[in-house]
Amino acid sequence: MNILVTGCKGQLGTELQKIADPCHHWFFTDVDTLDICDETAVEAYFEAHEIEVCINCAAYTAVDKAEDEPDLAEKINVFAPQILAETCLKHHALLVHISTDYVFGGDAQTPYRVSDPINPQSVYGSTKAEGEKRIMTIGCNYFIVRTAWLYSSTGKNFVKTMLNLADTRDEINVVADQKGCPTWAHDLAVALVTLVNQNGNQPVQEVFHFTNEGQITWYDFTLAIIEIGGKHCKVNPITTDQYPTKAKRPAYSVLDLSKIKEYAGIEIPDWRESLVKCIEQLSPVGATGH
Ligand SMILES: NC(=O)c1ccc[n+]([C@@H]2O[C@H](COP(=O)([O-])OP(=O)(O)OC[C@H]3O[C@@H](n4cnc5c(N)ncnc54)[C@H](OP(=O)(O)O)[C@@H]3O)[C@@H](O)[C@H]2O)c1
């Protein structure tokens, strides 16, 4: 199949490039080669390369900055997915779109199921939720996959930030009252390719959740990052009130994974197992591997 990946220089796009299966024709693009907000350019790209699958890794992902740039966040997270969905509909292509746990309100006590009502609390979450709705309304073939707490050995992310802070500080304060699910971008990339391969050219319209297995607070996640990374830095638990951010974060954003596991027969690694692998990629010598 001819598979277009947008936003290929980001965390997820980079992992897809690493695992790209040679039995498909892959077209990796980022904003410098294909701006997904440019309707004419998107249509021309689909036409020229006979695109059959579009994996949209492009997004506006700066959660706090989005509070000050709602128009830009809306352009990239709402209007661009709409353009991709319309183009996929026209070309009978499958759109694989990535969304977020931030579409949920964060006041649940048990993992959010795919069918639970959304209630975004931030500009970023609202634009991602609206992007989902536009795709569903247009009615192309789609997989919408919500993920959370994405990290990888490339790009800016929580794991790399904590490892860097541990090198320069004796103590770090981390919120201990927000619980979620870390996701290694490599595991998500593998799951997306599995969905695409299993589906082939069949009509499909499904929403899934994919994160690593397990649930954890940012504080406990940091303790694990420091330990696995072989760093020596004290980690202090603090409350969300003690660490004000522009965008409101969900207190609880654990996603229920049962649908994707049943649908695709996917075995999802535990968060700790994947964290070890990612940190080994970052610093093979420093990682303790346990
Ligand atoms: N990161 C997380 O913790 C997290 C959590 C839940 C869900 N997600 C979702 O997962 C997906 C992948 O996230 P990620 O962390 O891999 O994102 P990322 O690292 O921020 O990568 C996004 C990529 O898209 C590019 N891009 C931005 N605007 C574009 C445009 N108009 N046309 C084409 N490319 C454009 C970016 O380029 P520039 O860098 O030049 O802007 C960047 O290379 C996103 O849909 C995101 O919302 C992420």
Image: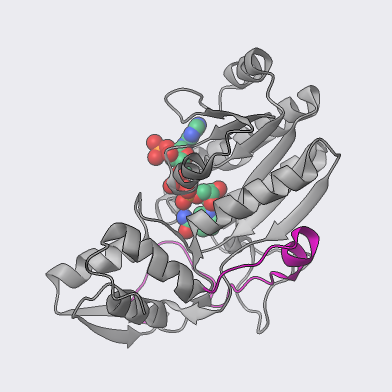
**Residue 26 at x, y = what percent?**
57, 30
- Residue at 54% x, 74% y is 270
Q: In which quarter of the image is residue 267?
A: bottom right
Along the horizontal axis of the image, is 97 left or right of 19?
Answer: right
Query: Image quadrant for the N terminus?
Result: top right
**Magenta region:** 241-270
Q: In which quarter of the image is residue 268?
A: bottom right
Along the horizontal axis of the image, is 188 left or right of 150?
Answer: right
Query: Image quadrant for the C terminus?
Result: bottom left
Along the horizontal axis of the image, is 200 left or right of 18?
Answer: right
Of the pair 60 and 235, the residue shown nearer to us = 235
User: Is residue 53 on the magenta stretch?
Assistant: no
- Residue at 35% x, 50% y is 154
Q: Which residue sits furthest front?
A: 23
The answer to whether residue 198 is seen in the rendering is yes
Of the pair 66 and 196, the residue shown nearer to us = 196
The correct choice, above or below, for 3 with respect to 120 in the image is above
**Residue 188 at x, y = what percent?**
57, 55
**Residue 204 at x, y = what percent?**
83, 44
- Residue at 71% x, 49% y is 195
- Residue at 48% x, 39% y is 17
Way the structure is coloured: one colour
Please tell me how many numbered marks the rendered image carries: 0
**Residue 222 at x, y = what percent?**
35, 77
Of the pair 258 and 86, the residue shown nearer to us = 258
Determine the main secondary structure of the stretch shown in magenta: loop
User: Is residue 263 on the magenta stretch?
Assistant: yes
The correct choice, above or below, for 198 with respect to 152 in the image is above
The answer to whether residue 133 is seen in the rendering is no
